[in-house]
Amino acid sequence: MKNTKKKTVLIVDDTKINIDILIELLDNRYDILVSLNGSRALELIDENHIDIILLDILMPDINGYDLCRILKAKESTKAIPVIFITANSDEESIDTAFEVGGIDYITKPFKALELLARLKTHLNTQKLLRDLEESHKELELQASQDHMTKLYNRRYFSEISTKVMQLAVRNKKPLSVLMLDIDKFKNINDTYGHPVGDEVIISLANTLKDISRLSDIACRFGGEEFLVLLPETSSEGAMVIGEKIRKRVEELVITPQSDINIQFTISIGVSEFNREDELNLELSIHRADEALYEAKKGGRNRVCLA
């Protein structure tokens, strides 16, 4: 269904007759808020969602230029378009209006159709900019996520882990790595098919999301293999977290069909980053991988420390 919600226009002008003219022109097309001075305008902006502002320059308390400066200096209001509507038509006034962040400048007396057209154009432009920003955020999210599990992907893990490692070195805090692998995953695929194998991978990913702390970084490293980065966590603490994950997975029951119940286990390798001697996390990940191999060799469904 098409969104028919009206855009909200804030009119800021200390002359009532100017406000009445604008209300008569815009009222059927937009939701209108009105302020006779800059102070009240700031209150209205804090209390309401404003899509665009029609702003006079000459006002008794805060003039239009200063009000625009205030809005453009705040993160929450800097994106609101400001159209100056004023009797001042000299070049200096126009230049100042754009310098302080105005998006347009209309002199009084204005032409009704011209004002409506400019207002519509700037609102459409704002919508386009917001849509582009949302699309950019979505693309960034997709680029950092594993498509199947919605965990971080290997590329993002590589980028963010470097920053986390540098922070651990700077603050002299411990940092540990878990490497997880699903036991006998090939048997699951061969017995039940790849779609069921995918369900098993997703269920493990969801378990990692549930158990992970806000500071932890869980990543699908490849296939049925996962990495979890644990900031401010020693190897002893990482062993505790790894055991918690192992037990939780052991208790999972996957029911891809009404007559099929699947349980599976994981093996986990644990290592702690050596911030005194290591320049990156490659050695820590390698040690975690070796510990994972030992867990597999020792019978699977266990947590081993490098």
Image: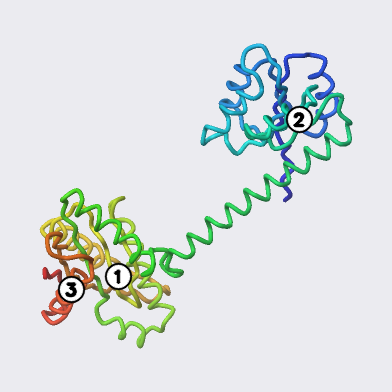
Residue 305 is situated, as x and y percent measured from the top left of the image, at 11, 68
Q: Amino acid at mark 1?
A: Phe
Residue farthest to the top, as pictured? 60
- Disc 3 or 2, which lies upstream in sequence? 2
User: In screen coordinates, is 91 left or right of 48?
Assistant: right
Viewer-proximal residue, 112 or 8? 112
Q: Which residue is mark 2?
A: 91
Q: Which residue is drawn at the image coordinates 73% and 36% (left, top)?
A: 104
Q: Any mark on residue 61, and which?
A: none
- Disc 1 or 3, which lies upstream in sequence? 1
Name above or below for residue 53 compared with residue 164. Answer: above
Between circles 1 and 3, the one closer to the viewer is 1
Residue 108 is situated, as x and y percent measured from the top left of the image, at 84, 24
- Disc 2 or 1, which lies upstream in sequence? 2
Viewer-proximal residue, 267 or 60? 60
Secondary structure category for the residue under label 2: helix
Between circles 2 and 1, the one closer to the viewer is 2
Q: Which residue is mark 1?
A: 226
Q: Which residue is drawn at the image coordinates 81% and 27% (left, top)?
A: 107
Q: Which residue is mark 3?
A: 301
